[in-house]
Image (cartoon, rainbow, N blue to C red):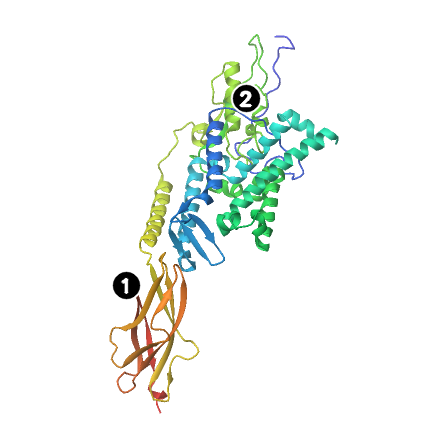
Amino acid sequence: MSEQQKPKKPRPAPEKIIPHSKDMDATKQRVHPRFAKGKYQKIRLISMYTILLGFLLAPWLRWDSRQALLFDVIEPKFYIFGAVFMPQDFYFFAFVFIIAALLLFMVTVYAGRVWCGYACPQTIYVHLYQYVEKIIIGDRNKRIKFDKAPWNAEKILKTLAVHSIWGIFSAVTALTFIAFIVGTDYLFFNGEPLFFMGWGKMTWIFFLLITFVTQTNGGYMREHMCVYICPYGRFQSVMFDKDTLIVSYDYERGEPRGARKKDNTHQYGDCVDCTLCVQVCPTGIDIRDGLQVECIQCAACIDACNEIMDKVGSPRGLIRYTTERQLVDKQKTKIIGWRIFAYIGVLSACIVAAALIVVGRSPLELEIRHDRKQLSSIGRDGMVENSYVLKIVNKTNEKQIYKVRLDGDTKGLTLRSRFKQLPLQANEPYDLPVSVIGDPAIIKAGSTPITITVYSTDGKYSTSAQNMFIYEAKEQK
């Protein structure tokens, strides 16, 4: 074999998992990825832009002549497809957040950072904004040259065009976010010739703030948000095990890497060292260096490598979705384990609890609060008086008229209320002061349980709550 035909010295295989990437410098050059094509990128595009479209359309959904999804933090009331949730129902949202977190953890254990690559809003907007650059400036090499080129008329015009389109996307995003809070009716149909003329000061502040944050994240932060700020990539190593599905490079098959020879005299592995897997990576890493915190598992490197393998006549899968047990230990991946049953059990319990909360939500809520300043007092007529505040919440979507009565063993006890009838609008709370009067000649000293019932005049709704009537005999003169 001649000197020219001798293969280069093989590169040593990198470590299997790299806890810290070789380049953690926040001042590194901007990443301009090449846009890969393939099976996984089609799935990514469908999932990402379906989520984005759903986000943009969600505020326009209507339910019973009202915005279907409205999170009014001013009142505060949350309207979700006809159901109204108030501060008293926030424990329900605690279950929702717990369910979402457990689902994310379970998916991470078995599918790695698939959320980051296919559904994360940061990933979606970065891809969208980079695609705008591709349309206006050009492919990867042209964008890199564009960054290095001196400022001239062409660069200024193209930069303004890119930022203008980014600004439109950012403004639309801000309007959508605010529409979930204040409603589309207030935001766009406020009776002004130009809808933004009817906005209040806080609406303008949040509109400008969200626009700025979206523009900054999608246009400048990009991969830095995933690498340095987002905590998800940092604790992923705690959740990964040998059976976690991750994007991996097959070292045994690919190394030593090098260009193919036409005469087939090379002694390299299947990796032709084309660096296309690096060029398509949205965070700018080399997957051949092992698992890294920057990898968002978008599978762009898989599609790019498969395309090259097809061209050189090698089988696909040099870079693929696999597990450590399968790739390193050469064993079958264990899908069923104790953790899957633990996650399913906890998730099922949380889902059942949340469902019971929704099904068991009462259209009328009552809470009795004893006057803390003075538990009981003696009036001029010698009667014992206890003061209470009834916190009544009409959770129906219609106006109701309510009455209050004293139930149970009422011997010697009388309920006094400021109002004989209490009209409440739909989803309106009200604090009603009432007093319970006790005859000391009949009631016993100490604490006597009482039951107060609130009911609608049409008989549809009623609810009761209990408290204590306190009478200390020493108070009587």
Query: x and y percent of residue 237 in the render?
Result: 50, 40
Query: x and y percent of residue 216 in the render?
Result: 62, 42
Image position of 306 with respect to 417: above or below: above
Query: x and y percent of residue 226 in the render?
Result: 56, 40
Q: How many marks?
A: 2
Q: Quadrant of the C terminus?
A: bottom left
Instruction: From the image, tell me which residue sits under label 2.
Output: 255
Instruction: From the image, tell me which residue sits under label 1.
Output: 458
318 relative to 391 in the view: left or right: right
Q: Quadrant of the N terminus?
A: top right
Query: What whole-number distance in Å separates the C-alpha atoms at marks 2 and 1?
Result: 80 Å
Which one is in front, 184 or 168?
184
SS of the residue at dot 1?
Answer: loop
Which one is in front, 78 or 140?
78
Residue in view at x 56 percent, y 34 percent: 128
Query: x and y percent of residue 360 in the render?
Result: 31, 55
Which one is in front, 349 or 462?
462
Residue in view at x 58 percent, y 29 percent: 286
Q: Earlier in the sequence, mark 2 or mark 1?
A: 2
Image position of 356 with respect to 38: above or below: below
* Mark toward the viewer: 2 or 1: 1
Q: Is residue 29 visible?
A: no
**Residue type at the position of mark 2:** Glu
Residue in view at x 28 percent, y 63 percent: 458
Q: Is residue 388 visible?
A: yes
Image position of 276 with respect to 2: above or below: below
* Outermost residue toward the bottom in this view: 477
SS of the residue at dot 2?
Answer: loop
255 relative to 105 in the view: left or right: right
